[in-house]
Amino acid sequence: MASHRSEKHLDAAITTAPELGRAGEGESPRTESGSDRDIVLAIERGDRRAALSLCARRHGAALGRLCMALLGSQVEADDAVQETLLAAHAGFDAFRSDGSLRAWLYGIARRRCARVKERRGAVQAGTDAADERTADELLDVRRRAERARDLLERVRPTEREALLLRYGAELSFREVGEAVGVDEATARKRVSRALARLRELVKE
Amino acid sequence: MASTNQSERCAEVLEHLGEVLDGTASPELRDHVAECDRCRDVRHEAEEARRLAESAGLDHRPVAELEARVLAALEARDATKPAEDTAKPLQGAPAKAHGEAKSERKADAKGERKAAKAPARSGTSPRVAVLVTGLALAAAAAVVVWRNGPAAEAGGGWS
């Protein structure tokens, strides 16, 4: 719970910056998977456009943070979010309503980001020049995020993704498993291993 | 024996750090953490690791009017069919060919793990390809002339 408070504090810091848009904040990204029922219903009645709108509105901001954590670039993260949502729209028929929509959506984002990273190869995405900000609190957020990403780069990719889906996107262990295509026990193991590894890296 | 059990428990804590942090670990493991100084420190450090993971994407600036942009991209994609990629990147990221982007989206939605392949490239250089094609055409023309004789060549037709 303490970590949630901490994150909300940082979110609040971000919100204070006038240059930052808060699109997608109309509905909280922290919704439980059960509240995606309206999206599932839209998919079931074939209203894919409405489903896409709801996904963008409800999950856009959280998807942006996940893609940013995985890619470290605002431009690439934004592109990945848009591509993720369009991929979801193209594949709503493939979504099984007995699963978690969040897990399915974030699974698409995870694969999209992995592909971007593969294509990028050894070129490390840096901070985008247009992102310069002056507020101290925002700089703190950025510094901490960049340090986190630097350390996470040294965590195995599958474990890193599981960790970010669990604590960045706040999926349950079961949803993490759904998102990455493994069972819940494996998802738990990956998260625990990532935590152990990251803990060692923080101590270095 | 007691110390063996103790170290086994410590190893178990490391294996189940996620559950330990969430408070969903077994009561025995939680009791062990409460009594073991080393594991209490491990949990403390793991909390910091978790907070770090939570912060890794917090410097992302939400895109203004994401919903409208995505819907516009969708409409543009549906309006223009083949040649162009209508899923316009938001901030200048390189555009992909329509077919490539579309197939990737399908693959993503289906959950296929395999990354979409980059546009196929021939291993042959353009210059060599032109030369081979030219030779093939010349050979084909020679065969036709040889089979049909001068009249056919003059008529310019294929029989």
Image (cartoon, coloured by chain):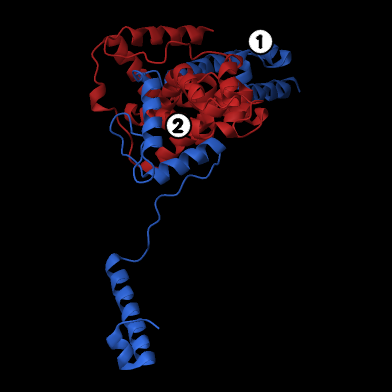
Chain colours: A red, B blue
Who is closer to the viewer here, A96 or A171?
A: A96
User: Farthest right residue?
Assistant: B1
Chain of the residue on which disc 1 is drawn? B
Taking the spot 49% from the left edge, 21% from the top edge, the residue there is: A50
Disc ID at residue B35: 1
Taking the spot 40% from the left edge, 26% from the top edge, the residue there is: B71
Quarter holding residue B84: top left
Who is closer to the viewer here, A77 or B23?
A: A77
Chain of the residue on which disc 2 is drawn? A
Amino acid type for the residue under numbered disc 1:
Glu
Q: Please indicate whether residue B154 sits to the left or right of residue B74 in the image.
A: left
Amino acid type for the residue under numbered disc 2:
Leu
Q: Please indicate whether residue A45 sits to the left or right of residue B108 in the image.
A: right
Who is closer to the viewer here, B131 or B157?
A: B157
Indicate whether B44 appears above or below B98. Answer: above
Quadrant of the image containing the N terminus of chain A: top right
Q: Percent from the top left, x then y, of residue A150?
A: 39, 28
Disc ID at residue A86: 2
Taking the spot 47% from the left edge, 11% from the top edge, the residue there is: A27
